[in-house]
Amino acid sequence: MRRALELAGSARLRSSPNPWVGCVIVPVDSRKGSASEVFEGATEAPGARHAEQVALDAAGARARGATLYTTLEPCAHHGRTEPCVDAIVRAGVARVVVGMVDPDVKVSGRGIEALARAGIDVEVGVMANEVAEQLAPYVKHRTSGRPFVVLKLALSLDGRIAARDRSSRWITGDAARADVHRLRAVSDAVLVGAGTIRADDPELSARTDPPPERQPLRVVLGCAPDEARAQPLVELSGDLGSVLDDLGRRGVLQVLVEGGATVAHGFHSAGLVDRYVLYVAPVFFGGDDGVPAFAGPGAGSMDALWRGRFVSVTELGGDLRIEVA
């Protein structure tokens, strides 16, 4: 299952809006043999093969009597591909180990039931927490209809995102900025306010090496100039919850909110942020006139503080990447 998780991670950049899933098939005669005797698969682009089918195609006749490990419950419904359950049963797999039940109402529990009815031994919940963490954007979308919201901020040690003259390039170094591009690449949409478009004229693209197979949808709250570098843009306005509902209907599983301070405050104060990613540079603006991370009223008392947990702290060059949930 740990290897299946690694394979699922490799599919993240191509599979959305489908879940990124990994699968490993262990033939009967290789459970005590070498790792080279197992067969692997990861979700392909939408409309192409699911992870289970990729692994089954690789295994061929060796799948009969084998154990199949998959991070997510195999589908049992007809979509753009045949049900994975049908392929598993037809291949003669004897045992299926599932990381977590699929939260999609079209699948949830039905794949497991179909496998059991076919006489296949099924075990569910192996490394379930790790799978749920990896698939958090997919789970959020399928259970709420809204995308998983990641708020990204690049800031100084004293909590400022720009100087008094509104300049902000560059607070962090090359390694942190490269990581932002990777974060954009795994997101289905990047969202900023119209003020950020006017002030910084960002491109909002994912510039990675190698280039990503797809670029995120670029979204602005308000209206953007026709000549903005980020064009073509989707212009949205109104209640932020309604904005997220709109993005969810567009198949956006994860939206990266990049600013500015008013937009960041809006999402934070409304309790709409699922994950905070902070890039912190070892610099001080040294005063109270720099642009704060959030523009708007904060907690009125200690009892009203928002409290989360540190998910990870990573050194990137001379900066820190702090992930908070």
Image (cartoon, grey):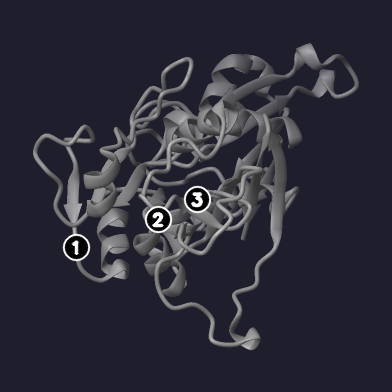
Q: For this view, does 161 lie left or right of residue 190?
A: right
Amino acid type, mark 1: Ser
First reached walking from the N terminus: tag 3 or tag 1: 3
Q: Identify the residue shown where x is 85% and y is 14%.
A: 34
Which residue occupies the foreground of this view, 163 or 10?
A: 163
Q: Where is residue 292 in the image (x, y as percent from the top left)?
A: 47, 61
Judge whether 63 appears above or below 275 on screen. above
Total label count? 3
Q: Do the residues labelled 2 and 1 touch (CB within 8 Å)?
A: no
Of circles 3 and 1, which is in front? 3
Q: Where is residue 128 in the image (x, y as percent from the top left)?
A: 70, 52
Relative placement, left or right, of 91 versus 244 is right
Q: Name the residue under label 2.
A: 147
Mark 3 and mark 2: Cα distance apart in space: 19 Å
Q: In which quarter of the view is residue 149 placed?
A: bottom left
Is 158 situated above or below 126? below
* Residue 256 spot, x, y in % from top left: 42, 48
Q: Mark 1 points at which residue?
A: 237
Q: Residues within 10 Å of mark 1 (few under 14, many from 20)?
A: few
Q: Is residue 141 left or right of residue 127?
A: left
Q: Is label 2 or label 1 in front?
A: 1
Residues at marks 3 and 1, CA–CA distance in whole angstroms: 22 Å
Residue designated by label 3: 153
Name the residue at 26% across, 68% down.
Answer: 242
Tell me the residue at 47%/72% (across/down): 271
